[in-house]
Amino acid sequence: MSLVVQKFGGSSVADIERIENVARKVIASREAGHDVVVVVSAMKGETDRLNELAFGAAQSSTPRPREHDLLLSTGETVTIALLTMVLERMGAPARCLTGAQVRILTDSAFSKARIQDIDAELIREDLGAGRIVVVAGFQGVDENGSITTLGRGGSDTTAVALAAALEADECQIYTDVDGVYTTDPRVVPTARRLETVTFEEMLELASLGSKVLQIRAVEFAGKYQVPLRVLSSFQDGPGTLITMEGQKNMQQGSMEEPLIAGIAFNRDEAKLTMIGVPDTPGIATQILGPVADANIEVDMIVQNISNEGLTDFTFTVNKTEYDRALDILRKQAEVLGAREVFGDNSIGKLSLVGVGMRSHAGVASRMFKALAAEGINIQMISTSEIKISVVTDEESLEVGTRALHKAFGLDDRSGNTVSVEGQSV
Amino acid sequence: MSLVVQKFGGSSVADIERIENVARKVIASREAGHDVVVVVSAMKGETDRLNELAFGAAQSSTPRPREHDLLLSTGETVTIALLTMVLERMGAPARCLTGAQVRILTDSAFSKARIQDIDAELIREDLGAGRIVVVAGFQGVDENGSITTLGRGGSDTTAVALAAALEADECQIYTDVDGVYTTDPRVVPTARRLETVTFEEMLELASLGSKVLQIRAVEFAGKYQVPLRVLSSFQDGPGTLITMEGQKNMQQGSMEEPLIAGIAFNRDEAKLTMIGVPDTPGIATQILGPVADANIEVDMIVQNISNEGLTDFTFTVNKTEYDRALDILRKQAEVLGAREVFGDNSIGKLSLVGVGMRSHAGVASRMFKALAAEGINIQMISTSEIKISVVTDEESLEVGTRALHKAFGLDDRSGNTVSVEGQSV
């Protein structure tokens, strides 16, 4: 007997028929001998409907946060009631709880509240009585009794937090895809589903554009060492287990351990460069300060050694912020006496991700060699402990991904190609 | 400075535009110097939408009560969030609270929970801080933290209960009609809006088919002596104040006090008679027992003195129950050895209601005389302290109502005729 927390998102509970499908999966786990806690999101479309009402009432796209959170929380409350009715109809004893009823205590940062504490007592009682417990995702309650929401992907966070509080054996996140892939199967038909991936690799894969899981939930799971599994709501299969690094090594054996977990790519960034800036202390802050003040998020930052007291400074931002960032940078170039400002919004970013990198030399050179063999020019390079990212022109992105996938031995050896709708890496 | 509780039903908050209309009324009261607590129902159509989901999930028209209540409660929660957003947008500080947040403590009789206690503290704090407080009607929370609903008309009950707990100066129920009328203005164009009506009169008027207020809320208001006012959501006007008898006398002066508050009529009943029943003790129970066991509600009951050891027993039921009641009665007539069973489902019931009746003789004879003058035959008579009801054939109902309205001096002396949509007496 083990305890699993299962989370199903909005498209998995979009209508009664799909909720019945979820109920069957939950009951199957129960019949396999597990205690089950289910976390669900609002039915697909419901949050949009509620937002439309809120925007109309507030005549603003930023309604009052306390009331907005209360309003949105009704979406998940509807789902837990319906799923519980379906479970009971199918003969499975079940009970539902809102975030406030569980007492998922959060701070009062409406719309992006952080969980502070969870009282697992009520859930344990219900599990002890042989019931499936259905909990509303995305919502909590602050110490004043006001309903809060956890922000985007909050239901994943709820599931992981409950798994941590209940010391669950596994937290299973059901999604549109059947696991985490070495790269996007739509671009590389020989992409493989990973049996396991480490938290850190998953974080890098997620931050590079994978939408399989919310970064925050992955961080949370890593912090509390909750084993996390990504599976498909719509087909059977073991999915991908996200583990501590040690567990991964043990399970796979070090001989077969792949050097690289996967290859992520991203077409959503644009590059900006300030040429010929006086290389004085604090120059990075003077360049990036005004960008940060405008609430523009910066991803890669590259500065090379200076030449005759001048240096070149490059960074990337989301494409949607390109024009604003360029304006700011041009003004700042005048202030700083820089020679010139360049920009390019048709770039692509390619990243190799893998904890194996730490202990193996030569990964970067193998990467650069594979790209060179395809005639791809590298515009920027940035590295971290477990990833190497390069910026290329946008057209080279797919060719580059396929080349790296092959060069690092990630291709499915069975020769099978996969086709997964909705995989977005 | 006084404190008013204002309640707006589903059609008053059917869309953002109507919610804005409600907000303007609330703000006008605030600006007139009152502290205001607003109670709202779910937006019109929302409860039906949620029920449809529930019936689909449960594959039953009686979903599990705990989950059904939780589901339905989201309807009012949506409304309080939206109204609060609108109030704030219009510049009025406001705050909303669910039933659980106020802590409207109920028993655990899901779908028809009874209020046990209200913690008025949070509301008092908000009022003290100059805020309008918006409370979700229809919902409460039991001692286990489960969300409950109060059943049909529950929002009226919430409003009255809050008014009692807060010792409000008045509880204002906004409806489709602009007050309580002496009778249905669609039938009697000279019908007058009553300035005041007593709780008991209102109860009789309501139980006779008036749908202006839920009986339960009126009983509740009477018990806690909460002055209740019925007004229109859609037009201005003082409405009708529902008072203690004493207050009414003081306000109107005894000279002008009308003998009769109003005339109610009802086409929804059918009459059943058992002829020639042996007149033995317990016979009423033997006749009505099986009817009650079948969950059929009985309204008027008339039994006359016996003749040669046999008696005739007549009662009325709702027309929709006529066939079932007739079947039961025929079977029971055989058991009891009664001579015959008659039924008539084209009857009408006419009732004179007024606390004045208690202290004035001759009301009944004046009533019978007025009906006789129109050639209307009286089939049954039943009286209570403050009402006299007669059953006639259905066709005589409207003529009889007009005749009584005139005979008891209820016609509008100004000669104005009113026309009120939605008045249903």
Image (cartoon, coloured by chain):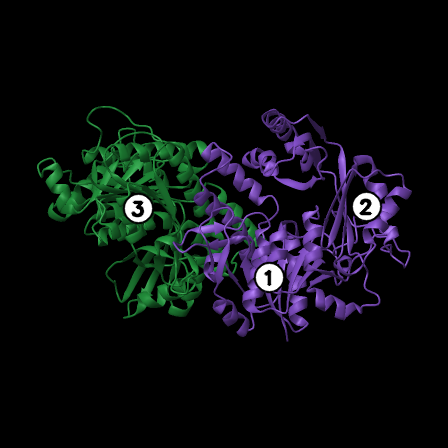
Chain colours: A purple, B green
* Residue B327 horizontal/vertical position (percent): 46, 60
Query: Distance from label 2 to label 1 (Cα)?
Result: 32 Å
Q: Which residue is drawn at 68% across and 59% down?
A: A199
Q: Residue at x 38, y 59 (%)?
A: B113
Single out the mark in the foreground, 1 or 3.
1
**Which structural element holds mark 2?**
loop
* Residue A87 horizontal/vertical position (percent): 60, 63
User: Can you tell which mark lies on residue B126?
Assistant: 3
Q: Nearest the camera: B405 or A332?
A: A332
Please tell me which of labels 2 and 1 falls first in the chain: 2
User: Can you tell which mark lies on residue A400?
Assistant: none
User: Is B421 rendered above or below residue A222?
Assistant: above
Q: Are marks 2 and 3 on the same chain?
A: no
User: Can you tell which mark lies on residue A186?
Assistant: 2
Name the residue beneath numbered marker 1: A223
Judged from this view, the residue extending furthest toward the bottom is A1
User: Is A120 rendered above or below residue A413?
Assistant: below
Tag 1–tag 3 contact (CB < 8 Å): no
Mark 2: amino acid: Arg
Query: Distance from label 1 to label 3 (Cα)?
Result: 40 Å
Q: In this orientation, does residue B380 appear?
A: no
